Image (tube, rainbow, N blue to C red):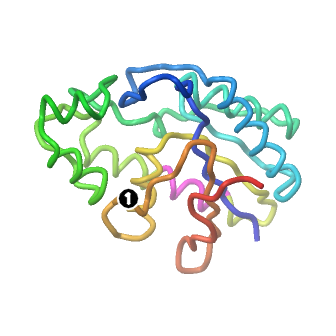
């Protein structure tokens, strides 16, 4: 049975830089380390999940670059899907954790990071309802594609916020810290008669 591989793009900050909240309006490229993470994932995919029937990516530069590395290794093209664009983090966008805490308090940040609680009045976009609808429709499409007789493994390259809400869609649980996927890591989902089964989550390529 073919599977769906969900991948988070590689690093966008150098080791000496302070990371900021990178959302839909902060279109950073991969660093050299981020590109190396892409090569590691591409090798794992071609070693273990080849051939690939499709590669989809969000439209931001970091996800496109990561998908391109995979597509070159797999000798396959990738396509863009707007529904897996990272969340626009509104008032948090391009701010460090320290800046967010100073402006809005530690509690609201921790409720999102630890508990997956959507912050009110922070101007995140799209709305939580719209985001959940997008992900539901997207995942339904992937399920249909993977349950046809001619289906092959598929790869999705997106960002952490989207992956956390895919986790919510799969499990019905809040997208808490358990749902977080590190840069360059991946997840594997298998379609079953009852929906999706999580085979791996937040796995580092060997």
Q: Residue at x 75, y 57 (%)?
A: 153
Q: Residue 130 versus residue 21: which sits nearer the camera?
A: 21
For disc 1, the marked residue is 177
| Main secondary structure found in the magenta portion | helix
Horizontal side of 90 relative to 77 (left or right) equals left
Q: Residue furthest bottom?
A: 193
In the image, is residue 142 above or below residue 15? Answer: below
Horizontally, residue 169 falls left or right of residue 148, namely: left
Residue 140 spot, x, y in % from top left: 51, 58
Residue 178 occupies quadrant? bottom left
User: Quarter of the image holding residue 109?
Assistant: top left
Nearest to the observer: residue 54 or residue 33 = 33
User: In what element is the residue under mark 1?
Assistant: helix
The residue that appears at 40% across and 27% down in the rendered structure is 24
| Quadrant in which the C terminus is drawn | bottom right
Is residue 178 or residue 72 the one in the foreground?
178
In the displayed structure, would residue 146 be above or below residue 124? below
* Residue 22 percent across, percent down from the top left: 40, 29
Q: Is 191 part of what is drawn in magenta? A: no
Location of residue 119 in the rendering, given as x and y in whole percent from the top left corner: 18, 45
In the picture, measured across the screen, residue 29 lies left or right of residue 136, that is right
Q: Position of residue 137 (x, y in %)?
A: 45, 52
Crowding at label 1, few (<14), some or many (≥20) Cα neighbours within 10 Å? some
The N terminus sits in image quarter: bottom right
Q: Which residues are magenta?
A: 138-145
Q: Is residue 112 left or right of residue 66?
A: left
């Amino acid at each position: 049975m073919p599977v769906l591989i969900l991948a988070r793009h590689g690093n966008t900050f150098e080791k000496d830089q302070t990371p900021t909240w990178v959302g839909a309006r902060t279109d950073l490229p991969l660093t050299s380390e981020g590109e190396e993470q892409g090569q590691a994932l591409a090798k794992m995919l071609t070693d273990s999940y080849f051939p690939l029937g499709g590669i989809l990516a969000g439209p931001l530069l970091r996800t496109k670059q990561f998908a391109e590395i995979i597509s070159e290794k797999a000798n396959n093209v990738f396509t863009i899907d707007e529904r897996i664009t990272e969340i626009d983090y509104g008032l948090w966008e391009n701010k460090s954790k320290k800046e967010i805490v100073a402006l809005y308090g530690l509690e609201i940040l921790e409720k999102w990071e630890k508990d997956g609680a959507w912050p009110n009045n922070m101007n995140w976009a799209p709305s939580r309802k719209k985001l959940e609808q997008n992900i539901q429709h997207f995942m339904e499409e992937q399920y249909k594609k993977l349950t046809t007789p001619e289906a092959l493994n598929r790869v999705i390259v997106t960002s952490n916020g989207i992956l956390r809400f895919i986790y919510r869609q799969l499990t019905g649980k809040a997208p808490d810290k358990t749902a977080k996927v590190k840069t360059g890591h991946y997840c594997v989902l298998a379609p079953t008669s009852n929906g999706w089964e999580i085979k791996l989550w937040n796995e580092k390529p060997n």
